[in-house]
């Protein structure tokens, strides 16, 4: 089941990623009376939505007593994914994204001294800490990933 979800996650990322030479466009939907512009998320937005879904799956596995074993390398795209037009990479983002990757990798270590739920929550709290500095909107959703 987890491999199927991981494969689905990777497929969603590949389908939603744009090549750098593609021109950014906003699709328009016309229903006969009005024209609507449809928001398309950036590569980073799409990546983070996938990371959310994958971490929700990991949370469920941990709560069921299953040790996650495979770190998804697609998470490393956090360092290169295109941000939305209004955002820029800065030192704060670079710091938190690096610390998140370190913390997330620890979730997949079987012989760690810290409990799996604590390691997992540490990784999620890196997301919260980063979002406190820049994009605060998703914080309530991210906090739903925490294991109580």
Image (cartoon, helix red, strand yellow):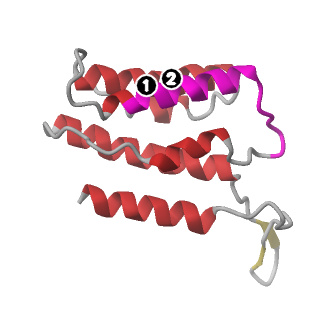
Q: How far is mark 1 from mark 2, CA to CA? A: 8 Å
The residue positioned 32% from the left and 31% from the top of the image is: 107
Residue 63 pos. (x, y %): 19, 35
Considering only vertical position in the picture, is 138 above or below 96?
A: below
Quarter of the image with the C terminus is top left
Considering only vertical position in the picture, is 106 above or below 5?
A: above
The residue positioned 63% from the left and 47% from the top of the image is: 45
**Dominant secondary structure, magenta:** helix
> Mark 2 sits on what residue?
126
Q: Which mark is residue 103?
A: 1
Closer to viewer: mark 1 or mark 2? 1
What range of the chain is rendered magenta? 85-105
Q: Residue furthest top?
A: 113
Residue 14 pos. (x, y %): 57, 65
Considering only vertical position in the picture, is 23 above or below 84?
A: below
Judged left or right of residue 65, residue 96 is: right
Q: Quadrant of residue 27?
A: bottom right
Judged left or right of residue 131, residue 84 is: right
SS of the residue under disc 1:
helix
Q: Quadrant of residue 37?
A: bottom right
Residue 121 pos. (x, y %): 36, 24
Task: Tell me if residue 86 is in the magenta stretch.
Answer: yes
SS of the residue under disc 2:
helix
Considering only vertical position in the picture, is 112 above or below 55?
A: above
The residue positioned 47% from the left and 26% from the top of the image is: 102
Q: Return the residue nearer the eye: 41 or 123.
A: 123
Q: Are marks 1 and 2 in contact (CB under 8 Å)?
A: yes
Crowd band around label 1 with a 10 angstrom C-alpha radius: few (<14), some (14–19), many (20+): some
Q: Return the residue nearer the eye: 40 or 50.
A: 50
Task: Tell me if residue 103 is in the magenta stretch.
Answer: yes
């Amino acid at each position: 089941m987890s491999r199927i979800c991981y494969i689905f996650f990777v497929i969603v990322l590949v389908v939603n990623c744009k090549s750098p030479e593609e021109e950014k466009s906003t699709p328009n939907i016309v229903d006969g009376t009005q024209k609507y512009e449809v928001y398309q998320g950036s590569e980073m937005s799409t990546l983070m939505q996938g990371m959310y879904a994958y971490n929700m799956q990991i949370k469920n596995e941990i709560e069921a007593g299953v040790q996650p074993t495979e770190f998804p390398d697609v998470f490393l795209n956090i360092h290169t994914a295109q941000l939305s037009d209004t955002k820029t990479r800065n030192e704060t983002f670079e710091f938190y994204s690096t610390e998140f990757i370190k913390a997330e990798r620890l979730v997949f270590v079987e012989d760690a001294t810290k409990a799996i739920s604590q390691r997992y929550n540490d990784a999620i709290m890196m997301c919260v800490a980063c979002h406190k500095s820049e994009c605060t909107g998703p914080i309530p959703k991210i906090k739903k990933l925490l294991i109580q």
